Image (cartoon, helix red, strand yellow):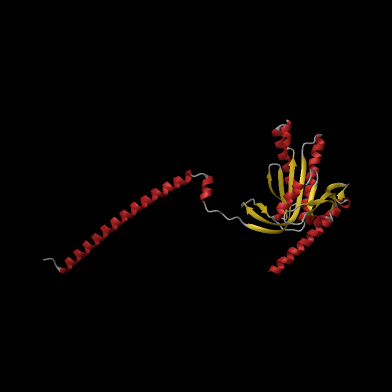
């Protein structure tokens, strides 16, 4: 007869053996599940690698782009006319190269005047002052940029002795909504009535002239010689008074060059910048 202590020990060993067997079976089940999940994971990874970048972007959650409001922005549309010369027998590639060169110089002009290039579409160039850094000097900067663009086109064609390209510009100042894209290099897409008005002014004008709205005129008339041009019909609103910018006022030019500012211009412009800086500082102090 087995002593009670030995019998109890046998029962404990048997119980531990059963538990160990159950653990081994559970471990085996878990291992099979892990293997199955690994296979599924590899299958999904393979499927994902086969999806195109465009498709991946389509099925990915849409990233919301930051939206900013700007109360005072000056928008310019510039239409470079000349690609129609292709139908007149001129070399297409030569014309496209020339247009690229023109836009390259436009980029340099707007950059030198702290203006933001928005985009180019075909032979249309769009830029805006007062973005992304808000200021009150942007109407003067954008109008000066337009004059310098016209002068650049005139100079290169005078040197070549041929008239191929013509420029038509429209400028308006007001509020816009800007959508920001990009991480390292930010770009801005702007919308609103101000953009629409600037575009209509460009279409309303004639080649060789810089047209501005009454709003812009009131902000730049101390710097530029302007002449009343006419009224732009605006649907559901009063007609818009339009002005033609002839150039810098004589007292602000270098040797009468209508788009080259002198020291008197720079002094007056810096006074406006100083006033702008004071307002920014006061606004910041009030918020704090």
Q: Closest to the observer: 148 or 197?
A: 197
Residue at 77% in and 43% down: 167
Q: Can residue 76 be seen by looking at this rendering?
A: no
Location of the N terminus (image quadrant)? bottom left
The part of the image, by quadrant, that contains residue 29 is bottom left
Q: Closest to the observer: 274 or 177?
A: 177
Residue at 74% in and 42% down: 80
Q: Position of residue 183 (x, y in %)?
A: 61, 52
The part of the image, by quadrant, that contains residue 267 is bottom right
Q: Closest to the observer: 148 or 176?
A: 176
Q: Position of residue 211 (x, y in %)?
A: 79, 49
Q: Give the total number of marks visible in the rendering.
A: 0
Can you say whether 256 is above or below 220 in the image? above
Can you say whether 213 is above or below 83 in the image? below
Location of the C terminus (image quadrant)? bottom right
Farthest residue to the top: give it. 89
Q: Can residue 40 be seen by looking at this rendering?
A: yes
Farthest residue to the left: give it. 1
Q: Closest to the observer: 214 or 105?
A: 214
Q: Position of residue 2 (x, y in %)?
A: 13, 66
Residue at 21% in and 61% down: 14
The answer to whether 268 appears left or right of 61 in the picture is right
């Amino acid at each position: 007869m087995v002593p009670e202590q030995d019998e109890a020990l046998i029962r404990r060993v048997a119980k531990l053996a059963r538990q160990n067997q159950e653990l081994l079976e559970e471990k085996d089940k878990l291992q099979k599940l892990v293997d199955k999940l690994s296979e599924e994971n590899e299958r999904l990874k393979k499927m994902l690698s086969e999806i195109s970048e465009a498709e991946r972007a389509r099925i990915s959650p849409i990233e919301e782009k930051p939206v900013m409001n700007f109360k005072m922005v000056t928008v310019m549309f510039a239409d470079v006319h000349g690609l129609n010369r292709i139908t007149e027998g001129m070399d297409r590639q030569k014309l496209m190269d020339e247009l690229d060169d023109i836009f390259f110089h436009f980029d340099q002009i707007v950059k030198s005047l702290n203006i933001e290039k928005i985009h180019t579409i075909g032979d249309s160039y769009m830029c805006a002052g007062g973005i992304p850094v808000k200021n009150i000097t942007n109407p003067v900067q954008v109008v000066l940029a337009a004059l310098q663009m016209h002068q650049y086109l005139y100079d290169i064609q005078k040197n070549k002795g041929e008239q191929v390209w013509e420029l038509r510009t429209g400028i308006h100042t007001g509020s816009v909504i800007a959508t920001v894209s990009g991480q390292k290099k930010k770009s801005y897409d702007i919308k609103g009535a101000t953009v629409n008005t600037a575009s209509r002014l460009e279409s309303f004008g004639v080649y060789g002239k810089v047209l501005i709205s009454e709003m812009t005129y009131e902000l730049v008339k101390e710097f530029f010689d302007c002449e009343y041009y006419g009224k732009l019909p605006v649907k559901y609103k009063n007609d818009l008074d339009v002005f033609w910018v002839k150039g810098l006022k004589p007292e602000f030019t270098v040797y009468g060059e209508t788009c080259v500012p002198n020291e008197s211009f720079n002094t007056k412009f810096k006074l406006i910048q100083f006033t702008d800086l004071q307002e920014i500082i006061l606004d910041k102090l009030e918020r704090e």
